[in-house]
Every structure is written in C-alpha cells, then in structure tokens.
Amino acid sequence: MAQESVHPRPQLVREEWTDLCGEWGFAHDDDDTGLASGWQLRTEPFDRTIVVPFPPESKSSGIHDTAYHPVVWYRREIAVAEPFGDERVLLHFGAVDYSARVWVDGVHVGAHEGGHTPFSCDLTDALAPDREEHVVVLRAEDPPTDVAQPRGKQDWRPEPHGIWYHRTTGIWQPVWLERVPATHIVEVQWTPDIAAGRVRLEVGLNRTPDTAMTLRTRLHLHGDLLAENTVRLTSHRTVTDIAIPALLDGPAVDLPLWSPQHPTLVHAELRLIDETRTVDLVASYLGLRTVGTEDGRFLLNGLPYYVRGVLAQGYWPESHLAAPDADSLRREVELIKQLGFNTVRIHQKVEDPRFLYWCDRLGLLVWGEMANAYAFDSEAVERLTREWLEVLRRDRSHPCIVTWVPMNESWGIQAMVTDPAQRSYPTGLYHLTKAIDPTRPVISNDGWEHTESDIWSIHDYAARGDRLRARYGDRARIEHMLRRGRPARHRILLDEAADRGQPVMLTEFGGVRFVSDEGQQGWGYSTVASPDGLVDRLAELFEAVLDCPDLAGFFYTQLTDTEQEQNGLLDESRQPKIPADRVRTMVQRPAAAMTHERPAP
C-alpha cells in the first residue's frame, strides 16, 4: 500500500472519500464577537488563508502566529453532488483543539469538545438546494491559559518554558467528506480471544435499522479466507464472536500472532445487507495477539517480552502536533525501529490514527497516553474522563497498543498524597479503563505516586549508571525504591496493599543533552560536551538498566529534540546525533531480565 493511500480512519475505510485538507479561509476572533456578528454567514471576516490541517501557531499553516488567540474561525467552499436517494453526506474532523462548532450554508450541524478525538457532522439536511458550492464554517475555541483543559505539553504561558511547547489550536488532523447510506456502519471494534480460538466483533450503526439487516464479515490472511460470519442486526449495536479454527488447529507457525517481529495483520470486509442488497461496505483490519503481566514480567502472546522503549513527543518544529505530511508518520515509526526500540510511549498526546496504522503494519508496540490537565476540580475531571473514553473507543482495536496511561506524574493532582479525592481520581480512571478494555495493562499515574496499576512505572533521571544499579540492581533494592525511595522526590507506591508483584519498568530515564556550544540555549537532565561523550554516557546508562535482572523494560527520554528540550537521540529534524547503528547496539544489548539473553560477565 502506498503511503498516500492511507485513510485518515484506517480501521473503518470506505473506498470513496474526499480529502478537504488544503487552503481554507481563516480569521482570529480575539474579542469573541464572531458568533454575535454572524461570521458563519459572512465572507469578509475571513481575510487570511490557512493550510489545513496545520495549526495557526505553526509555520506550515502559513499563519505562524504563536500569540494568544483563544478563538479562531475557518471557512471553505466545497462541491457536494446532490445526495442520491436516501444517502447522507458526512463531514469528518480527525481532531480540533479544543472545542468546535460547525455550520454548513449557515446551518449549525454539529459541535464537539476534546482536542485529541474525532467527530463527524451530517450535512445532508443543511445543504442549501440548487447550489453547486456549499460553505463549511468552523469555529474553534482553545483558551490558552485554561489549565483545567486536557492540554498535554501545550504551554499556557506566552512563550514555551520548562518542558512545555508552543500551542496547537484548531484543526490539526485531517478533514474529509464521505457519502454513506441512510443506515451505515459508524464503529468497528475487534477483541481477539486467542485461547478460545475466536475474535469478538462489536459493530455500531448510526441508527437502529427500520427492518432487520444482515452483517456479513469475512476475514482474510495473506489473501486466503480465514473466517466468515453472518449475523442478523436488529439494533444499532451488535456483538458477535467469529470463530477462527486455525487458532486451535495447529502450531502458531501456521497462524502467526501479531508481534513487532511478525506484524501479521488480518484484513476484514464488513458488508451490511438489506435483504439481498448491499447497503454498506467497509474495510478494516485486526491483529491476533495477547498482552498481559505475570510474575514480574510483561507478556506478549503469553511469553515474557522485554520492553525496549523510547519516549516520543510527536512534535515537529514546523507543524507542532500535526505531522508535516502523511509520510512523516511512517518515517517516525521506521526511525524508532532503526534505533533498535520495540516500543514507543507517545507522551501527553493522542497520536494520529495513521501513525498507529504504521505501528500496526510495521510492528511497533505503543503505550497509549492521554494529554493531561494541570488543575483538579469537577470540570477538569469531567473533561478528561469524557475525552479519555473517546480515546479508548477510537483506538482499542489497534494491536500495536499494549498499555493504557491515563495520567502522568501527578499532573493536575499534585496533592494526591494528602487529598483522598485526588487519590481516587487516577484509581477511578484505572478501573474505568479496565471496564472498557480489560485486555490491556493500565497504569493509573505513570512515573510515581501509584494507587492501582498493572505495571509499576518509575521515572528516574539519574545521570550515571552506578546510581541506577544502586537503585534497581536486584529485587531487594527495587522493593526499597517502591516503598521508601524518592527518585524524583516522590513516593512510588501510595498504596502498598495494591502491590501484586507487578512488573517494574523505568518508563523515563536518560534525557542526556549533547552541547557543543556553551552558549547554546536549551536543556536536558544531564549534559555531555561531545559526540564521543554522548556515546559513552548512553552506553553507561543502557548497560546499567539492561543489567538489572528485575526490571521488565525501559523507555529512554527521548526520541528527538523538541523546542527547548535538547535531549533527543535525534535532532528536531530527525537526524541522528550519533550513528543509528551505535544506538541500536546499545538498545538491543541482552537484558539480564531475560535469562536466555543474560550478558556475559
């Protein structure tokens, strides 16, 4: 498949769709007068041009204005042929930060709140008759100083400071148009059950059908029919189990399970049938694999799997949270794998589904993480919880995602040690996530101050390898760190009764900055002065972590330099600071935790 053919929603694809990225009219609305002035009906306020889907703060957008602009407007004329019969015309937005309202030909057709998740609008009844061109207008509101809003690493100050970056406002993922039947498929979810030799399929329709319909599903592997299932639909949501006898008939080599080493994907065709007529036809895919934890190890397909991960911000200097182009998403996955990593933790961002597609297809494990807020009150809890549920709904069928991380480093819950309400929040998110998806490990609060988690994740930026060995070199030392240690002045476990022997991982470490010019701006967690110094320091840190027999994995900070954070293995243009093969050798050094990989003394 060519990169350009990747659909913006790769797990629910119809062949015909219209890309609406490109030039749109644009206007700032700093005084928030646009609604009262009827900008959705006017043309003159839109006196600038923006390139969608790049945020207006970015160079790629053509606007490149990083000042505070809490309200922005977009306008575009589109050609829409008159719907045939009972067809519907849908307008899809991959992500708009933070809240959006949409009009077509002056008629309000939809609204959404949440800066990382998709939404759709049915334009059909709003399309003015006898017009060749129709007008789409979107208003986005993104208060730059609202810290109760899930914002991740978008800075609330006028200029980036510390570990926070320039903001991403408005449209930042693809926009596209689609014609669908009156009753159509809007959601497809896959849950493999390897032990039972089946996969569970959940299908959502846009409405309850007027009369019963049939859903026929075919699964193909390498072009061969793997399974077929037919089920009668009488409701807008249906759950059915599809038997896959090949999972039970022989050794795994006959039906390879999905893994980074063998990213085998099963392709699916879903056909919605009304009597004998095909009403809707969509393509999807899934991966057959299991993940879990046991005896202090992370498991993939029932076997211990050592996590060799890297932290990635998913941020580009010219386009911010939006990828510069579709190919950049594939290239990011390829770069991570070339450096020897088998896992990526996308940090404080819900990544573009096309990135997840390439992780699925090329074989890269992903820790799915939510962008956090920085305040604790009822509104902040409601906002994050609602958007997190949308994240789970959008992404839980991707085989690459193996762990969920709703919160990070007590952001927004800084008083959770002393405040029972704040402590209940990540615990509640843990159980809510498990209720939606019981098949993956969940980490309530990555880094420290865990209440309930399936992996004890620790952030430790010790600058030297001997300090890491002293803290994590054997089980006794790890137990001390979990209960008494303070690697970042924070307790690791807040509820020791929750300890079930979970795997322990260093999910942030390293952060080494290479500086050749003493006057160079930026920072890292520690600093070296030459490429050779960077090689030596990285080798020391990776050796120390990999020599700890009771660590189940790691995540190095970080993949690329990002604005003032100059601690990447690559610079912000994705160029290696030292040869990639040298990094790969360090990353893939045998891990003492895997007995068959024990390094020589």
Image (tube, rainbow, N blue to C red):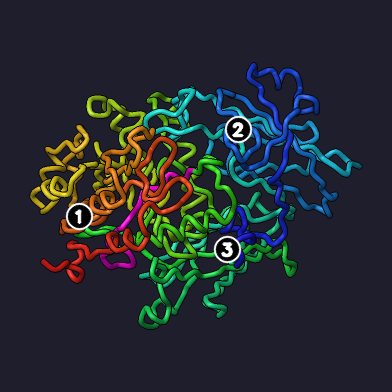
Part of the protein shown in magenta: 300-315
- Tell me the crowding category of disc 3: few under 14, some 14 to 19, or many 20 or more residues within 10 angstroms, Cα based: some
- Tell me the crowding category of disc 1: few under 14, some 14 to 19, or many 20 or more residues within 10 angstroms, Cα based: many
Residue 447 in the image: state x and y as whole percent.
27, 41
The front one of 285 and 545 is 545
Quadrant position of the C terminus in the picture: bottom left
The span from disc 1 to disc 2 (Cα, nearest Å) is 44 Å
Discs 1/2, front: 2
Amino acid found under the numbered disc labelled 3 = Ser
- Tell me the crowding category of disc 2: few under 14, some 14 to 19, or many 20 or more residues within 10 angstroms, Cα based: some
**Do the numbered discs 3 and 1 sit on residues whose CB atoms are within 8 Å?**
no
Q: Which dot marks residue 551?
A: 1
Q: Which comes sooner in the sequence, label 3 or label 2?
A: 2
Secondary structure of the residue carrying tag 2 is loop
**Residue 424 as seen in the image, left or right of residue 89:** left
Amino acid found under the numbered disc labelled 1 = Leu
The span from disc 3 to disc 1 (Cα, nearest Å) is 36 Å
Q: Which residue is mark 3?
A: 284
Amino acid found under the numbered disc labelled 2 = His
Quarter of the view holding residue 408: top left
In the rendered image, the vertical position of residue 304 relative to residue 466, given as above or below = below
Secondary structure of the residue carrying tag 3 is strand
Queried whether the magenta region covers residue 302, the answer comes back as yes
Q: Which comes sooner in the sequence, label 3 or label 1?
A: 3
The front one of 426 and 167 is 167
Residue 560 in the image: state x and y as whole percent.
41, 47
The span from disc 3 to disc 2 (Cα, nearest Å) is 37 Å
- Residue sitting at x 64%, y 56%: 185
In the rendered image, the vertical position of residue 111 relative to residue 464, given as above or below = above
Queried whether the magenta region covers residue 264, the answer comes back as no
